[in-house]
Image (tube, coloured by chain):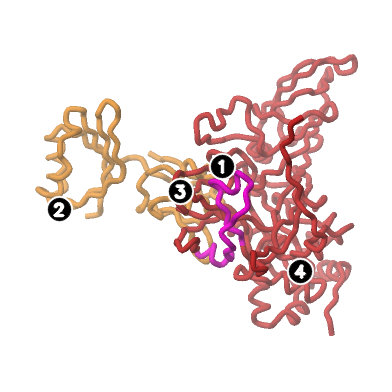
Amino acid sequence: MAPKKIILRFGKDISEKPIIVHLAKDYGLVFNIIRANVNPNKEGTLVLELSGEQYEQGLEFLKSQGVRVQPLAEEICRNELKCTSCGACTAICPTGALYLERPSMEVRFDSDNCVLCQICLKVCPVKAMAIAS
Amino acid sequence: MAIEKTYAEINEKIRAGKAVVLTAEEVIALVEEKGVSEAARQVDVVTTGTFSPMCSSGVFLNFGHSKPRIRMQKVWLNGVPAYSGIAAVDAYLGATELPEDDPCNSNYPGEFRYGGGHVIQDLLEGKQIKMQAVSYGTDCYPRRELETYITLEDLNEATLFNPRNAYQNYNCAVNLSSKTIYTYMGMLKPNLGNAHYSSAGQLSPLLKDPNFMTIGIGTRIFLGGGVGYVAWNGTQHFPVIQQDANRNTYGPAGGTLAVIGDLKQMKPNWLVGTSMLGYGATLTVGIGIPIPVLNEEVMRYASVTDRELYAQVVDYSSAYGLREPGNFGYVSYAELKSGKITIAGKEVPSAPLSSYPKARQIAGILKDWLLQGDFYLSEPVQLLPSYKDEIVSKTLEIKGI
């Protein structure tokens, strides 16, 4: 199956427990951490890309541990009418999701490689990047 | 026999629909195949283009007179101040001007989402602009304040006048420090994390006529999607041939243009409001200049490639800001456009701030105008100073009293 992007929310009671490790160890799932954050109230948010045969069982396990699981509804999109293909984002984007195609030097956006860090929203000089949900 | 063509001869060919026009990119292939002489014989005009943030830009506006009249002392357009220290209802709106309530860099790095350049783009999009003005009141201009809405169409004149555009060449900016910096050259990651450059290289107007053999006062150009003119040399016009300590040369740099044109016939996709994170607001300007192939020498320069044009690598974390000498040598635009360069033995990702696809599009549009007979060449009233004039830049010294 293709990896799915999900958001996991941890209450402060469980944010310090080792939970994610069981996805790999007990359910054989492959995960890629896209974003992780623990706020001052010790509540955790984790954005994961997850795949594997026991995907549903893995999600059931997370829920049994008190983790709230949501599908990732937001994604970064590029307004192709606004984008001038200047290229200012291409050496900033940490995963190469935004890149220059050569020799045309047109900026391309491969959303599969996007990890939602949102730095492009700030550095785009013409505000062509946006969050869509 | 040496090839010599005049402006009049080339214009006659344009009129007859017989002119041969190539973009600066296309002409490179022709010269590589047939040589400079044959290319100069065949081609009449080479078109160039550039599309980049150009801070020294702005527009003179005349609002018309309200009833009763006001001698505007201060003017705001969508909250952005315009300079009104000229006649009663004239003002100059600069591209980098910010709204007075902009948090700027107090919330570092500031976003600078709206400024004078964005007002110019909004005007071109036909949007209603909120206008406010105040005054002290005079016997002949009794009104003391006004608030209304204007559109570009409502104005008597809107004259784009950019005192410094189309930089001949530009630095390649890097950051040697250990923290991220935010500059007019974009976000620069620490420890040589990236390198930003800002030129169309082999398509850029002043790199294709480096000695100002054809570009001068009165040259008709593509400006912001419409027709404009070279008004004068730009501010800080210091053309040089770049040289390192060992007297190796690295091509031209330093020339600039002041340009002028009627904003009302320009287009919002060629004058784009621009925000540089942590630095400020500005305007991205599209400029294209036709180079008449008067002789072989003009053709030789017009056909140089990214392999022969160089940018100077400069550290923006310290040397630039402190106005201290020191650069990391020169890199060619061919290297810069490959996506990685080597500085001090380290491989550094390189990226442009200047849109090469838009530059190519501009050169193409100008070519079409010439082929369709919609655009004729103008012979400059006077050529601009070149490196041979050895203009030396002055610095500002801080003096006590």
Give the distance between the C-alpha atoms of the residues marked 1 and 4, in whole angstroms: 36 Å
Tell me the residue that label 1 is attached to. Answer: B276
User: Foreground mark, 1 or 3?
Assistant: 3
Instruction: Respond whether the residues carrying marks 1 and 4 are from the same subunit.
Output: yes
Q: In the rendered image, which quarter contains the C terminus of chain A?
A: top left
As for residue B327 lying within the magenta part, the answer is yes
> Do the residues under discs 4 and 3 have CB atoms within 8 angstroms?
no
Residue B329 placement: quadrant: bottom right
Give the distance between the C-alpha atoms of the residues marked 4 and 2, in whole angstroms: 64 Å
Give the magenta range. Answer: B311-340
As for residue B322 lying within the magenta part, the answer is yes
Q: Reading the chain from its start, which is encountered first: label 4 or label 3?
A: 4
- Residue B355 shows in this picture: no
User: Foreground mark, 4 or 3?
Assistant: 3
Q: Could you say where residue B249 lies in the image, as x and y percent from the top left?
A: 67, 68
Tell me the residue that label 2 is attached to. Answer: A53
State which chain disc 3 sits on: B
Tell me the residue that label 4 is attached to. Answer: B45
Q: Amino acid at mark 2?
A: Glu
Q: Reading the chain from its start, which is encountered first: label 1 or label 3?
A: 3
Vertical comparison of A27 with B37: above or below: above
Q: Nearer the viewer, residue B32 or B385?
A: B385
Q: Nearer the viewer, residue B63 or B286?
A: B286
Chain in red in the render = B
Q: Secondary structure at mark 3?
A: loop
Tell me the residue that label 3 is attached to. Answer: B190
Q: Could you say where residue B298 lies in the image, as x and y percent from the top left?
A: 77, 71
What is chain A's hue in the picture? orange
Instruction: Respond whether the residues carrying marks 1 and 3 are from the same subunit.
Output: yes
Give the distance between the C-alpha atoms of the residues marked 1 and 3, in whole angstroms: 18 Å
